[in-house]
Amino acid sequence: MGQYVIGLTGASGAIYASRLIGHLKGLGHEVLLVASASGVKVAQYEGQAELFKQVDKQFDNEDFFAPISSGSYRYSGMIIIPCSMGTLGKVALGSGDSLLTRAADVCLKEGRKLILAPRETPLSLIHLKNMCALVEAGAKIVPACPHFYHHPQNLNELVDTVLARILDLLEVEHSVSPRWREN
């Protein structure tokens, strides 16, 4: 099975990361986590602290000696979820000033799958230009915009509509959320 890196930032929406980790683990994949200090605080504040116990390994965001900081370390892809606009901007600029942004930079330079799930509104022109730069560099942008056409019955089902798209982009077989006209 695959090995995926989850980047957790301080944007609201830690439930997205928590449920994605649970789905990947449930499908037999290994999950590595790198979280910003704000990401840890927001996850705890939003009642999602259990996500830290679900992962196979968590790296300190300041540990540039972690294996995910190197292009020679192979993994299946990285998802930054939820992705703050600050992190998105740093990745777009290739700053690599933390392990999280360095690992994302590695994905881009090595041609690995990199998905960013921003959870911000409204978007400024700067946000949009940064997203364009990332798409041009090979990343996928999947805004945390759930859909309603399958009539979700609870918050988890609503969140899973976004996660299903992410799993599709990772080419991970799943049945997390009904597809169009499958409900």
Image (tube, rainbow, N blue to C red):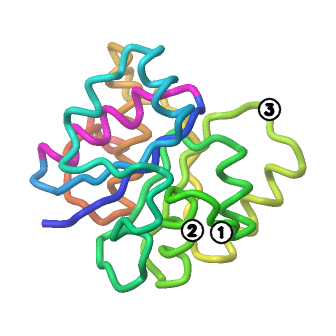
Location of the C terminus by quadrant is top left
Mark 3 nearby-residue class (10 Å; few <14, some 14–19, many ≥20):
few
Residue 49 rendering spot, x and y as whole percentages: 33, 22
Q: Earlier in the sequence, mark 1 or mark 3?
A: 3
- Measuring 40% from the left and 25% from the top, which residue is drawn there? 158
> Disc 2 to disc 1, how far (Cα)?
5 Å
According to the picture, the residue beneath numbered tag 2 turns out to be: 139
> Disc 3 to disc 2, how far (Cα)?
21 Å
According to the picture, the residue beneath numbered tag 3 turns out to be: 122
Q: Please name whichever residue, 40 or 135, is drawn nearer the observer in this view of the structure.
A: 40
Q: Which residues are magenta?
A: 12-26
**Disc number at residue 94?**
none
According to the picture, the residue beneath numbered tag 1 turns out to be: 135
Residue 143 rendering spot, x and y as whole percentages: 59, 43
- Measuring 45% from the left and 15% from the top, which residue is drawn there? 46
Q: Please name whichever residue, 94 or 175, is drawn nearer the observer in this view of the structure.
A: 94
Would you identify the image quadrant in which residue 11 lies?
Answer: top right
